[in-house]
Structure formats: structure tokens, C-alpha cells
Image: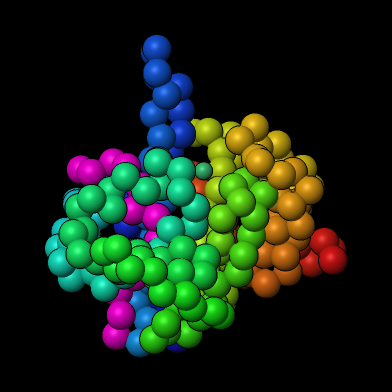
């Protein structure tokens, strides 16, 4: 079984003349490897989240990106020389290696979940509490707007989606597989989806 912890709780909000957002950042420990999903873009929160776990950036083995939006990605700069993974590739400096199925060396399955972005992917993590989908922006909410009843989970609008039909398909697929969901921004939740299929 893997262990999973939210290092930074993602937010998204308007603030005066600008917008503020960073993604949820999740730490997974599997097969002696420490993997961060979506390092986000708030440097201070990420470093203090790591510190609380007794970790420094150099203790992390890999970074997995659910997709390439900057609010999920910019903190990659804090991890020089690290392997960065997306849906089906590992990037190591200027080299790209393909992989399929699970994150190499782990039992973490990766599901292609396009819709919010074409390259979007969702790791499924088997923990003692059930399967956790680290679902990136398949779901995200501005602060105070999170709604996780079955109907809202399928109908919630995503103004940034590149393909709304694909997004709906990806959401259904993940709801069928997951006991818990870590959204892109907002709190981890347990979907009540018995009647969705
Ligand atoms: Zn996004």
C-alpha cells in the first residue's frame, strides 16, 4: 500500500486586481520512492509543507504533473535534476523516456484524463483508506465554492476546459475507480457515486 499526504492545500481566488492560485500538492510514498504530484507555484507553502514532513527538495525522487498549467508546475524549479513525469513520459534533463501503465518502480497506475487539458492525467494511489485519485483539475473550485454531491461533480462547469465532452468522460471514469479524490484546488473529498454508473 502507498501512503499519501496533502503537503499544500490548493486555492484559487480573486484578490483586488489579480488572481491568486496554487494547486494541491500531494506527497506519495510507494515502494521506497517519494513522489510529488503537482508542486504548485507557492514556494513558501511548498517548502514549509516539506519541512513539516522532515523533508527537503533533494529527498524527493520524482515529480508527476497532472497537466502543464503554471499554477501546478512552476515550483518544479525547486527540484533541480529531478525526473519529471507526465501521462506517458519521463523527462530527465533533455532526455524523454516513454512508459506505460504505472509510474516506473511503483504500483501507482496512471490514467489519461483529457478534457481540462489535452495532456491531463490522473494517478490512482492504493492506500489503506482506499483508492485515492489525484485528479488535478478534473475538479477545481474557487475558495468557498466546493460542492461534492454526485450531480455537481458531473455538471460543474470548467471555463478552462479544452474539451468538455472529454472532461465529462474523464470525470465519470475516475468516479468509478476512486474512493477519494484530491482536486486541483480545494479539499480532498469522498465522492458519493453509488448511482453514477
Ligand atoms: Zn489547470
On screen, residue 151 above or below 84: above
Taking 127 as reference, is 113 left or right? Answer: right
Residue at 28 percent across and 41 percent down: it is 42
Residue at 26 percent across and 64 percent down: it is 93
Q: Position of residue 117 (x, y in %)?
A: 59, 47
Q: Position of residue 190 (x, y in %)?
A: 61, 61
Taking 184 as reference, is 45 left or right? Answer: left
Taking 182 as reference, is 92 left or right? Answer: left
Residue at 70 percent across and 36 percent down: it is 157
Q: Is residue 152 visible?
A: no
Magenta residues (range): 32-44
Q: How many marks?
A: 0
Q: Residue furthest front?
A: 94
Residue at 28 percent across and 53 percent down: it is 76
- The quadrant holding residue 36 is bottom left
Q: Residue furthest top?
A: 17
The way the protein has been coloured in the rendering is rainbow
Quadrant of the snapshot with the C terminus: bottom right
Q: Position of residue 40 (x, y in %)?
A: 35, 47
Q: Is residue 36 magenta?
A: yes
On screen, residue 96 above or below 155: below
- The quadrant holding residue 191 is bottom right
Taking 36 as reference, is 66 left or right? Answer: right
Q: Is residue 100 magenta?
A: no
Q: Position of residue 38 (x, y in %)?
A: 39, 55
Quadrant of the snapshot with the N terminus: bottom left
Q: Is residue 170 visible?
A: yes
Front residue of 35 and 154: 35
Amino acid at each position: 500500500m502507498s501512503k499519501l499526504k496533502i503537503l499544500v492545500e490548493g486555492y484559487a481566488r480573486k484578490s483586488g486586481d489579480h488572481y491568486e492560485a496554487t494547486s494541491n500538492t500531494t506527497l506519495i510514498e510507494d515502494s521506497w520512492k517519494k513522489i510529488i504530484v503537482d508542486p504548485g507555484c507557492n514556494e513558501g507553502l511548498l517548502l514549509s509543507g516539506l519541512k513539516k514532513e522532515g523533508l527537503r527538495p533533494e529527498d524527493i525522487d520524482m515529480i508527476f504533473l497532472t497537466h502543464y498549467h503554471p499554477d501546478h508546475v512552476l515550483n518544479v524549479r525547486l527540484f533541480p535534476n529531478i525526473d519529471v513525469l507526465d501521462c506517458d513520459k519521463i523527462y530527465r534533463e533533455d532526455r524523454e523516456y516513454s512508459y506505460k501503465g504505472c509510474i516506473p518502480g511503483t504500483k501507482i497506475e496512471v490514467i489519461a484524463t483529457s478534457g481540462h487539458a489535452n495532456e491531463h492525467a490522473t494517478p490512482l494511489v492504493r492506500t489503506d483508506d482506499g483508492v485515492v485519485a489525484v485528479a488535478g483539475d478534473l475538479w477545481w473550485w474557487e475558495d468557498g465554492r466546493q460542492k461534492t454531491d454526485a450531480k455537481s461533480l458531473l455538471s460543474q462547469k470548467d471555463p478552462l476546459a479544452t474539451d468538455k465532452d472529454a472532461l465529462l468522460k474523464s470525470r465519470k471514469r475516475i468516479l468509478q475507480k476512486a474512493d477519494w479524490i484530491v482536486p486541483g484546488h480545494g479539499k480532498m473529498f469522498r465522492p458519493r457515486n453509488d448511482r453514477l454508473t
